[in-house]
Structures are given as structure tokens and as C-alpha cells.
Image (spheres, rainbow, N blue to C red):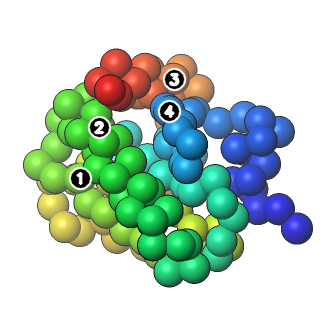
Amino acid sequence: MSSVFTSIIEGNIPSYKLDENEYAIALLDIFPLREGHTLVVPKREVNHWFELPADEFAQLMSYAHQISHAIRQAIPCNRIGVVIAGFEIPHCHIHLIPVNHMNEMEFSNPKLKFSDEAFRDTAHRIMQFIR
């Protein structure tokens, strides 16, 4: 059975896609901890990050690095937190979270709610700084 991320990658489920390359896609998390909370998802459907071949994991991290720079330029923050947890969806994904304090990365915190317009605005601001 395909994951929700595979359905998004295939274009069957709408998303706030920021960018994609041969190996991965970057999209806004629809249940964000902070504005600009982004997911970087490999196109290869694997449950655990360590199931990716080493070269693909390196590509994934390099891509997350690139996307982090764009987020940092678009969203005022002190850091971009990086989390690979994988409990929500059985498809490896990296959380890139713009934060000012460590406690802003706690997944037990209430998720923020944004309108479609706000998500689109955030996506547009980040996309301006990609590449």
C-alpha cells in the first residue's frame, strides 16, 4: 500500500509543494509546529531513513540543506531544527522547523492552523529563495 507521501508525489493528493528533484520533494507540513515547517520526503518509499541506500540518503540530506537555506531566508528564526522521527507516516521524511528556542520543536506542542491563503503565502516566500 502506498503512503500518503507517495500519493502526494504522484500528484493524487494536493500539497503545498515548494520544490522537487530527482530524489525528493519538499512541501509544507499541513500540521506545522511553526510557520515554514517543511517536510523533505524521498521519492523512494522506505519506512526508515537507514533503509535508503547511502548515496540516496546523502542526496536527501544535501537537498534538505538547500531547502533549509531557503526557509532561513524567508522565515525569521534563529535556527532550522532537523528531525527524522517517522512515527506519523511509514515513509521516511525529514522535518525542517524554523525555531527560535529548542522547545518549539516538541511534537507534543499544539499544531498551528493556517488558512489556505497563509500556506500559499508561506510557500511563495520560501520558493523565492530556492536555487
**Residue 120 bears which disc, if any?**
3
Can you identify the residue that label 1 sits on?
80
Amino acid on which disc 3 is placed: Arg
Please name the residue that numbered disc 2 is placed on. 71
Q: Is residue 16 above or below residue 82?
A: above
Above or below residue 103? Residue 19 is above
In this rendering, would 58 be left or right of 79? right
Q: Nearer the viewer, residue 82 or 102?
A: 82
Q: Position of residue 33 (x, y in %)?
A: 40, 55
Assign the C terminus to one quadrant of the image: top left
Mark 3, residues whose alpha carbon is within 10 Å: few (<14), some, or many (≥20)? Answer: some
Label 3 SS: helix
Q: Nearer the viewer, mark 3 or mark 1?
A: 1
Callouts 3 and 4 close, C-beta under 8 Å: no
**Circles 1 and 2: CB distance less than 8 Å?**
yes
**Which type of secondary structure does the marked residue at label 4 adopt?**
strand
- Looking at the rendered image, the quarter that the N terminus falls into is bottom right
33 left or right, relative to 100: right
Asked which quadrant contains residue 66, the reply is top left
Disc 3 + disc 1, Cβ < 8 Å? no
Q: Earlier in the sequence, mark 1 or mark 4?
A: 4
Q: Nearer the viewer, mark 2 or mark 4?
A: 4
Distance between mark 3 and mark 4 Cα atoms: 13 Å
Counting residues from the start of the chain, the first of labels 2 and 4 encountered is 4
Q: Earlier in the sequence, mark 3 or mark 1?
A: 1
First along the sequence among labels 3 and 4: 4
Q: Residue at image x 29%, y 50%?
A: 65
> Residue 17 is drawn in which quadrant?
top right
